[in-house]
């Protein structure tokens, strides 16, 4: 008893449904009662809307101005340090992961301790100044790498280079300490040889 649908639809012509008389007017009446039209005589509410809009725009402009002027003041302040520069706000090694923060803190603390323990004297001043110039060059390279980290984004090569830079600075300070010890021992030997 299967019938082919194509055969059934061959003679079919759709007819539009007819609405009863007055259907449209009844629908419009129900619509008007459900959603009444607002009267245009309420002008005080209109002025309140305008005043609120102006207040919001002025508030946004004031906050924007304050934010921009604070950024300008921060950029004009220059902070000089002998160790890791912090002029560049942005991403640092410590911001990438807690492990990298520990590594960075370890090296920075070691560098600061070694710099603080340097005993400068007229005999070793030239040696210390030479090493400090090398440290300054490494510090500038670190700043450049940090800028690259912020502009390009974190990559394994940049992170490795930043850690290697910190490691090189610490090793350089250890070499300086060893040279100062050797210099002091040499002076002590020369002094003891001259007194004998």
Image (cartoon, helix red, strand yellow):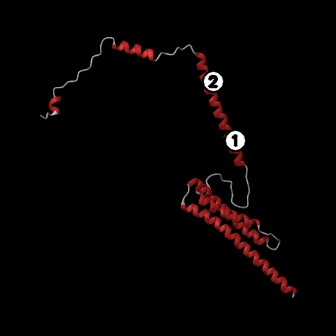
Q: Quadrant of residue 6?
A: top left
Lateral position of residue 113 relative to residue 145, left or right: right
Q: Quadrant of the N terminus?
A: top left
Taking the view exactly as shown, the residue that stands out farthest to the bottom is 196
Residue found at x 65% / y 32%: 59
Lateral position of residue 46 relative to residue 194, left or right: left
Residue found at x 62% / y 30%: 56
Taking the view exactly as shown, the residue that stands out farthest to the top is 22
On the image, numbered disc 2 is attached to which residue?
Answer: 51
Seen in the picture, residue 119 relative to 59 is either above or below; the reply is below
Residue found at x 73% / y 58%: 81
Taking the view exactly as shown, the residue that stands out farthest to the right is 195
Q: Earlier in the sequence, mark 2 or mark 1?
A: 2
Q: Position of residue 136 (x, y in %)?
A: 70, 64
User: What's the distance in space between the residues labelled 2 and 1, CA to CA?
Assistant: 27 Å
Q: Position of residue 3 (x, y in %)?
A: 14, 33
The residue nearer to you, when weighing 36 against 67, is: 36
The residue nearer to you, when weighing 17 against 53, is: 17
Do tag 2 and tag 1 residues touch (Cβ < 8 Å)? no
Circle 1 packing at 10 Å, graded few (<14), some (14-19), many (20+), is: few
Q: Quadrant of the C terminus?
A: bottom right
Seen in the picture, residue 94 relative to 33 is either above or below; the reply is below
On the image, numbered disc 1 is attached to which residue?
Answer: 69
């Amino acid at each position: 008893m299967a019938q082919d649908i194509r055969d059934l639809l061959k003679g079919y012509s759709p007819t539009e449904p007819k609405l009863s008389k007055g259907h449209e007017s009844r629908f419009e009446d129900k619509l008007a009662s459900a959603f009444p039209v607002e009267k245009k005589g309420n002008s005080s509410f209109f002025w309140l809307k305008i005043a609120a809009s102006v207040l919001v725009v002025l508030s946004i402009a004031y906050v924007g101005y304050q934010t921009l002027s604070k950024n300008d003041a921060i950029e004009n302040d220059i902070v000089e340090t002998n160790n890791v520069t912090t002029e560049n706000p942005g991403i640092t090694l410590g911001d990438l992961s807690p492990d990298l923060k520990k590594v960075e803190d370890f090296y920075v603390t070691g560098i600061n301790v070694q710099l603080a323990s340097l005993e400068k004297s007229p005999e070793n001043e030239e040696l210390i100044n030479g090493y400090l110039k090398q440290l300054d060059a490494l510090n500038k390279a670190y700043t450049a790498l940090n800028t690259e980290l912020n502009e390009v984004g974190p990559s394994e090569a940049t992170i490795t280079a930043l850690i290697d830079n910190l490691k090189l600075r610490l090793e350089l300070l250890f070499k300086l300490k060893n040279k100062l010890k050797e210099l002091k021992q040499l002076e002590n030997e020369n002094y003891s040889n001259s007194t004998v």
